[in-house]
C-alpha cells in the first residue's frame, strides 16, 4: 500500500500510462473506484477504455504507474495473485 491508499477502493490507478508504439492509449490516469460502486467507462473509439480494462484484468502491464485491487498492487507481474483472486470471483474476467 502507499500513502494514498483508499481502504474503500476496489480498483485504484495511480498515474498509469500505457503506450503502444508512440501513441499513449492511457496517459497519467489516476482513479479510485469505490467498493460496491457501479462504474462504466465511456468515450470514443481509441480513447483507452479497453486498455484500462485489460490493465485491471492483468492482461497488460502499464509503462508507468501502478494498479491496485483492494489496495494490493497487481502491476508487479503478470496476473498476480490479487488479480487472479479478484477475477476468480467474477465471471467476466475469463471473457475479456
Image (cartoon, helix red, strand yellow):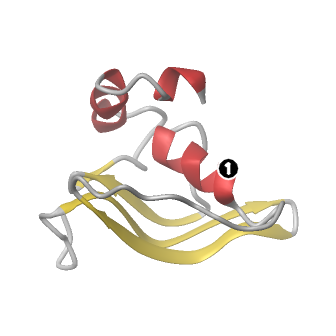
- Please name the residue shown 41% across and 73% down the image: 31
Instruction: Between residue 54 and residue 43, name the one nearer to us.
Output: 43
Q: Position of residue 65 (x, y in %)?
A: 48, 68
Q: Is residue 10 left or right of residue 87?
A: left
Quadrant for the N terminus, please: bottom left
- Please name the residue shown 58% across and 61% down the image: 41
Q: Position of residue 72 (x, y in %)?
A: 23, 50
Q: Position of residue 68 (x, y in %)?
A: 33, 56
Circle 1 residues within 10 Å: few <14, some 14–19, many ≥20? some
Instruction: Between residue 74 and residue 31, name the one nearer to us.
Output: 31
Instruction: Between residue 42 and residue 83, name the one nearer to us.
Output: 42
Q: Is residue 52 above or below residue 89?
A: below
Q: Position of residue 66 (x, y in %)?
A: 42, 63
Quadrant for the C terminus, please: top right
Q: Is residue 65 above or below residue 69?
A: below
- Please name the residue shown 76% across and 70% down the image: 24
Q: Is residue 67 above or below residue 77?
A: below
In this orientation, does residue 51 appear?
A: yes
In this orientation, does residue 61 appear?
A: no
Q: How many marks?
A: 1
- Please name the residue shown 48% across and 28% down the image: 93
Q: Is residue 5 left or right of residue 60?
A: left
Q: Is residue 55 left or right of residue 89?
A: right
**Residue linked to disc 1:** 50
Looking at the image, which residue sits at the far left?
7
Looking at the image, which residue sits at the far front?
38
Badge 1 element: helix
Residue 9 found in image quarter? bottom left
Amino acid at each position: 500500500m502507499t500513502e494514498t491508499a483508499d481502504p474503500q477502493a476496489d480498483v485504484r490507478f495511480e498515474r498509469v500510462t500505457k503506450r503502444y508504439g508512440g501513441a499513449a492509449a492511457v496517459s497519467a490516469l489516476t482513479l479510485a473506484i469505490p467498493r460496491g460502486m457501479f462504474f462504466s467507462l465511456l468515450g470514443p473509439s481509441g480513447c483507452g477504455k479497453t486498455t484500462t480494462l485489460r490493465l485491471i484484468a492483468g492482461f497488460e502491464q502499464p509503462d508507468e504507474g501502478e494498479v491496485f485491487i483492494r489496495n494490493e498492487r497487481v502491476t508487479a507481474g503478470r496476473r498476480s495473485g490479487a488479480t487472479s483472486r479478484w477475477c476468480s470471483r467474477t465471471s467476466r474476467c475469463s471473457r475479456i
